[in-house]
Image: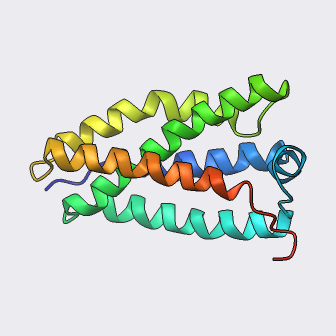
């Protein structure tokens, strides 16, 4: 397989989204609308996830990458895609900017289809395992959203 630079959009989008959420104080917003989210907990979690996103982008972009890492990119992109809609909906429902909306709309939505097409065009990716990856990404995002209801102030 040839190297695919498109997979680097996973960490690039994640870092931009992290910055958007940081700049507009996502922990305070989550605490107001869902449950307490201490900033140190959130920053630690996002830092670990940033490292994982960079590793995923690196592994998936390598010529020797197999379908597993590239399907994981498709799943993560579905998580990002659905996250953009979460931010849009909560901006409307709560009547205030949901930190992460700009990066979700400007990056996650337009970059999803090109990334999914790149994965679909991989020689060892079937329609079935691409669909499974997209479903997994959506389900994982639902679990992330359920996490908003957990009080993390004691962590």
Task: Classify the position of the C terminus by image quarter.
Answer: bottom right
Q: Position of residue 54 (x, y in %)?
A: 49, 62
Q: Quadrant of residue 33?
A: top right
Reply above or below: 23 against 109: below
Reply above or below: 154 against 145: below
In the rendered structure, the answer to whether residue 2 lies left or right of residue 31 reads left
Which residue occupies 80% across, 68% down? 152
Q: Is residue 46 visible?
A: yes
Which residue occupies 81% across, 30% down? 97
Reply above or below: 105 against 31: above
Scheme of image coloration: rainbow
In the rendered structure, the answer to whether residue 125 lies left or right of residue 9 reads left
The residue sitting at the bottom extreme is 155
Nearer the observer, 8 or 80: 80
Reply above or below: 122 against 154: above
Q: How many marks?
A: 0
Q: Quadrant of residue 55?
A: bottom left
Q: Position of residue 146 (x, y in %)?
A: 64, 54
Q: Position of residue 32 (x, y in %)?
A: 90, 46
The residue sitting at the left extreme is 123
Task: Classify the position of the N terminus by image quarter.
Answer: bottom left
Q: Is residue 104 visible?
A: no
Q: Position of residue 116 (x, y in %)?
A: 31, 38
């Amino acid at each position: 397989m040839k190297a695919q630079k498109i997979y680097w959009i996973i960490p690039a989008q994640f870092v931009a989204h992290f910055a958007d959420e940081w700049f507009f104080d996502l922990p305070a917003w989550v605490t107001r609308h869902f449950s307490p989210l201490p900033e140190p907990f959130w920053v630690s979690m996002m830092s670990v996830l940033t490292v994982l996103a960079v590793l995923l982008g690196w592994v998936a972009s390598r010529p020797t990458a197999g379908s597993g890492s590239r399907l994981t990119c498709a799943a993560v992109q579905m998580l990002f895609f659905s996250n953009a809609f979460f931010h849009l909906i909560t901006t409307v429902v709560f009547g205030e900017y949901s930190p992460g909306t700009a990066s979700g709309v400007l990056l996650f939505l337009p970059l999803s289809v090109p990334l999914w097409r790149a994965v679909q065009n991989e020689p060892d990716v079937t329609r079935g395992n691409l669909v499974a990856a997209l479903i997994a990404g959506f389900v994982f995002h639902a679990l992330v959203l359920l996490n908003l209801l957990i009080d993390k102030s004691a962590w």
